[in-house]
Amino acid sequence: MYACSSLTGDTVIRRAVCLCHRPEIHSLTSRINAELTRRGFVAGMAASVAALGFPFKAKAQTPPPPRSTLFTNVRLFDGRSANLRDGLHVFVEGNRIKSIASGTPATPEGAQLIDCKGRVMMPGMIDAHWHSLFAALPLPVLLQGNIGYIHLAGSAEAERTLLRGFTTVRDLGGPVFAFKQAIDEGLIPGPRIYPCGAMITGSGGHGDLRPLSDVPRTPGVQSFTERTGAAAIVDGPDEIRMRVREQLTQGASQVKIVGGGGVSSPRTPLDLTTLSEAEVRAAAETAKDWNTYITVHAYASNTVQRAINAGAGCVEHAHLMDDATARLMADKGVWLSTQPFLSDEDTGRLTGPNLVSAQQVFGATDGLYKLAKKYKIKTAFGSDMLFSAALAQRQGIMLNHLSRWYSNSEVLAMATSTNAQLMALSGPRNPYPGKLGVLEEGAYADLLLVDGNPLDNLALLATPETSLMVIMKDGKVHKNTLKG
């Protein structure tokens, strides 16, 4: 990579004249070449230059500060109340809501004025179970594709996610740390991301996507999904501690542990429990040491109970849990992050073992939400769309499914202020420590202007291309279809 053949003559002279021939450069070149596919060119260069003792400072691509914006003639859903407040104006300065008050004040100098004409403003929505890089690409592409292409496709889907009104997502597995940084720095449009990093699974568990030709596992040899940062395969408490620490070191706000079987993995039926209590406890204790939490993928009652007893802060899915397990979850104050899967319209057409697992979930969804309401479990909304651009568009439709069990105001609160409480569970690891999911003074300026009243007609959020007139995230307008 770094070699020079233009100089001839004595080796000692060449070394003195050209850095290319120094032994440490040749050593560093080998390291860079070995690391490029895993860490990327910039990271490899930074580490290598630092090792030589040369100064190196990456220049962050900081976006210009957003201008101030005055919204007038607003009907406000604040994320908590079941009623609207009429005749308000909302003033945004920088990336925060500066003030909310009655009447129409003079437009501050330099501010953008948006007359909402009596439309409803609500907080930007939060999806508590999303996969930024996996949502819209087919699984074969993800398993065989170039990581550069995957990130480019993911950036296009990130913008579509934002334009569906989801200004924040909790990413439940995938190599999104650099992706999140690019969004935060304004290089690409997309939602705020609470990243987990690699989903951590035991050998043979949901998330272990090795071909059977790679079994048995060779200690120290990583599979393709591990090398790309999509998953981490562990066996034993010590190994899971290491993998949890690795995700937190890279910037995870919380960590996802795969405790049992899943729908999208044909070799892991839902009844499986694939991590021991000691392994889950080791992960929970490590996350607690970092002042954050683990969330555990689990469907069956015994898997959910193991996660709760081992110290998990949140459980994903839990469709097959029984009454006693739901009561335990409520007693321990553990969060439930789940999805209202009703039919193959929500998952795509499946076959074989995947279809068997999906049908179990479809049949159990109604009972799950009834248990959550019965025991007043802290419940978050997530869509968990995977491997299909068509399915990814159904975020708003999935949200509408919740109207089978909740009022419209309860659904809207779940997707905004309630989900924001779950985001805040990451404590000091929270990458966005301001107020999310609410419209009030001092909160982040993440907001939607709806052409209609979602408290009366929740289906408006299933057609964001026509129903969302304005989308603002972090004080920046990403969509405005209002004339003038």
Image: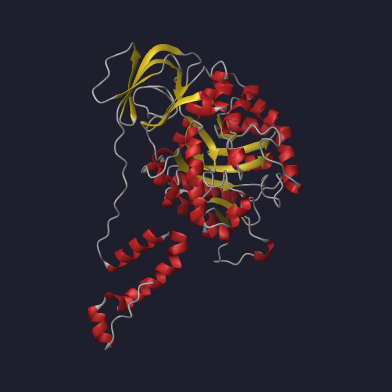
Q: Quadrant of the C terminus?
A: top left
Report which quarter residue 18 is drawn in: bottom left
Q: Vertically, is 133 above or below 123?
A: below
Q: How is the image coloured?
A: secondary structure
Can you give x and y, in whole percent of width and height, for residue 207 in the image? 61, 51
Q: Please name whichever residue, 13 or 259, is drawn nearer the observer in this view of the structure.
A: 13
Q: Residue furthest bottom?
A: 10
Residue situated furthest front in the rendering: 483
In the rendered picture of this protein, how many numbered marks are placed on residues? 0
What's the residue at 56%, 57% (across, down)? Answer: 145
Residue 426, image x, y percentages: 45, 39
Query: Compared to 354, does 479 lie above or below?
Result: above
Q: Position of residue 112 (x, y in %)?
A: 31, 25
Residue 292 appears in the rendering: yes
Side of 129 relative to 25 (left or right): right
Q: Quadrant of the N terminus?
A: bottom left
Is residue 26 placed above or below 330 in the rendered structure? below
The answer to which quarter of the image holds residue 225 is bottom right
**Residue 125 in the figure: left or right of residue 435:** right
Viewer can see residue 422:
no
Q: Is residue 61 left or right of residue 261?
A: left
User: Residue 407: image x %, image y %?
Assistant: 59, 18
Apparent side of residue 454 relative to residue 366 in the rendered image (left or right): left
The quarter holding residue 86 reads: top left
